[in-house]
Image: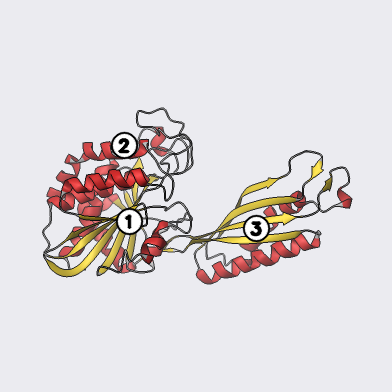
Amino acid sequence: MAFLWAAAQALAPELVTWRRHLHAYPELSFQEKETQRFVSAQLDQLGVFSVREIGGTGLVADLEGKEEGPWVALRADMDALPIQEIADRPYRSQRKGLMHACGHDAHMAMLLGAAALLAQHKPWTKGGVRLIFQPGEERAPGGASLLLNEGVLSDRPIRAIWGIHVTPQLPVGQVGLRAGPFMAASDELHMTLRGPGGHAAYPHQTPDPIAVGALLVTELQAIVSRAADPRSPTVLTIGQFHAGEAPNVIPTEARLAGTLRTFDEGWRARAKALLQILITQKTQAWGLTAELYFAPGYPVLYNDPSLTKRTEEWLRALLGDTAVQELPLWMSSEDFAFYSQVVPACFIRLGTAGPDPSTQQMVHTPAFDIDERALPIGAAVLAHVALQALSEGL
């Protein structure tokens, strides 16, 4: 353990270099070809991994023991977001309108660091470790489901999988876990309200999709406040409302879109059915037609209780008791959830907030950054859980 921690700290300069390169050259979901080439080149230099492409722009890297046995997997996501970075730093994004604003650059750097640590320290003889560099986490239906269809967790006897995600809600040096349901299921709803259109001065002569859309924005919240079990967290947010071209015209349509977050699959299905009923009835009452579409979303991310308990014990031994804490439910979503439906999984939150205000900015914002002192911690965490699992014969 002391060897692993010292080796991770010695890797810090490389981890920073990798992360800053990836940050400077972000690519959108399922377009990560240059990212794929860069990651592959770093893995090739280690000389002990069997590397292959998966999911078009993803990578799988296997480190195999001398004998057959159980395997474990570690996953990092690769894609960036369509956000224009506003910070003026040496490693800022070189691609207009694109940014690693969710820390996937750090996730890849830490998994490369874990690869280097595993290559240096390979005490087990049975089984192996699979590293998954996954494309398209930010774009539903998500790269995880596509990789699962290609056998990423079934063509080896994989017994468990871990993922890690940076968070400015914890300081550097802290990690957080939660057993059982951890992150919400997510669904996107897209609705279009249509009518004949008309003159704004004569609202009594034509149905108004803007007025009805505005009613729906507020009335749909009754599904959360009156139909949802208050013991089961639910969020419904309408994030888009597009309608009209002129101030004196009632338009022919209004387009709205939003997100539904839930923690119970039965309620998730019922909530979508209620949304359909309410939207249809409200628009019909006002003489409009409605088209409603639910984009495929992510399920609830479930941290296997037994695996999470063991992971917590391993991390306390690595980082100290005060560095590991239990987290509340998170209403954000992650396509790592698909892996958690297939094998025991544990998703870890890594603190990245430091004294610099930019490291305290929320993810998915144009000023987001991390305190890079977290990089060797994350690399050590990933390597440590894999080594412990294999040494204990998980």
Q: Which residue is mark 2?
A: 21
Graded by Cα atoms within 10 Å as few (under 14), some (14 to 19) or many (20 or more), the crowding at tag 1 reads: many
Q: Position of residue 219 (x, y in %)?
A: 70, 57
Q: Amino acid at mark 3?
A: Gln
Which marked residue is nearer to the observer: mark 2 or mark 1? 2
Q: Nearer the viewer, residue 233 or 47?
A: 47
- Label 1 sits on a secondary structure element that is strand
Q: Earlier in the sequence, mark 2 or mark 1?
A: 2
Label drawn at residue 163: 1
Q: Which residue is mark 3?
A: 221
Q: What residue appears at the point 43 percent right and 35 percent down from the top-left corner? A: 95
Q: Amino acid at mark 1?
A: Gly
Q: Amino acid at mark 2?
A: His
Q: Are marks 2 and 3 in contact (CB under 8 Å)?
A: no
- Label 3 sits on a secondary structure element that is helix
Q: Earlier in the sequence, mark 3 or mark 1?
A: 1
Q: How far apart are the alpha carbons under marks 2 and 1?
A: 22 Å
In the picture provided, is 245 more to the left or to the right than 372? right
Q: Are marks 3 and 1 in contact (CB under 8 Å)?
A: no
Q: What residue appears at the point 33 percent right and 64 percent down from the top-left corner? A: 345
Q: Position of residue 99 (x, y in %)?
A: 43, 39
- Label 2 sits on a secondary structure element that is helix
